[in-house]
Image (cartoon, rainbow, N blue to C red):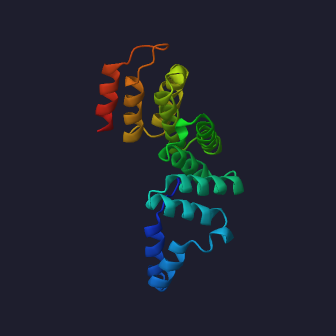
Amino acid sequence: RGRDVVRYTVADVKRWATEVGLEAAAFNECLDSERHKAEGGEEGLLLLGASHEQRQQHREAAEAYERAAERAQSLVEAHLSAAIGLMRSGAAKEKSSYAKASDHAARSVEIMPDLPEAWLTQAAVRIEWGAAHAENSAATIRAVVEEDLPKALALNPESAEAWCLLGVALILPSPEWKEPDGAKAVDAFTRAL
């Protein structure tokens, strides 16, 4: 439909460079060295973030994605990647970093409300925060179960990731909201399969 997010890895870029006839060894060495990273625009920062992710350098990846989002505030890929990068780095468990991850996820929903991945990312950020901070979990988990995942599933009813996240949200303890709902969680996990 022309509105989907396209994700690519450093390996993809290296393969494409070879396919268009670039000298693979020289191109790969240049890309891996990151010597031109300061010159790149938001696309370069997205590529840099992907390079860091490939090396399991999640904080550095999140920083590159955040810089891309600052440069191009309507670039949904930058916001989604920044939110995910902050979660992968473990930083989303810290209040200030969670606020950043949450802002990036919310911005991606604002930019493309018909993109299931935007709603899924927002749900994942909220689940991570709710699981780490019991005092905030009731409202957080309620938002995931009642807002984020129903919207993601309305856009893509076959999303295994959305069904799986719903199952996780339903089994998280939240004394202020209700007891975990095992039967609905099992149903959601089953639909994920």
Q: Is residue 181 above or below residue 112?
A: above
Q: Nearer the viewer, residue 137 or 158?
A: 137
Q: Is residue 118 above or below residue 190?
A: below
x, y (%) of residue 131? 46, 29
Q: Nearer the viewer, residue 17 or 82?
A: 82
**Residue 91 position by quadrant:** top right
- 134 relative to 107 in the view: left or right: left
- 185 relative to 152 in the view: left or right: left
State the residue at coordinates (41%, 34%).
Answer: 165
**Residue 171 position by quadrant:** top left
Q: Nearer the viewer, residue 109 or 84?
A: 84
State the residue at coordinates (31%, 27%).
Answer: 187
Q: Nearer the viewer, residue 1 or 24?
A: 24
Q: Is residue 62 above or below residue 123?
A: below
**Residue 139 position by quadrant:** top right
Q: Is residue 26 above or below residue 119?
A: below
State the residue at coordinates (28%, 39%).
Answer: 193
- How many numbered marks, from 0 up? 0
x, y (%) of residue 104? 62, 43
State the residue at coordinates (63%, 41%).
Answer: 100
x, y (%) of residue 8? 48, 62
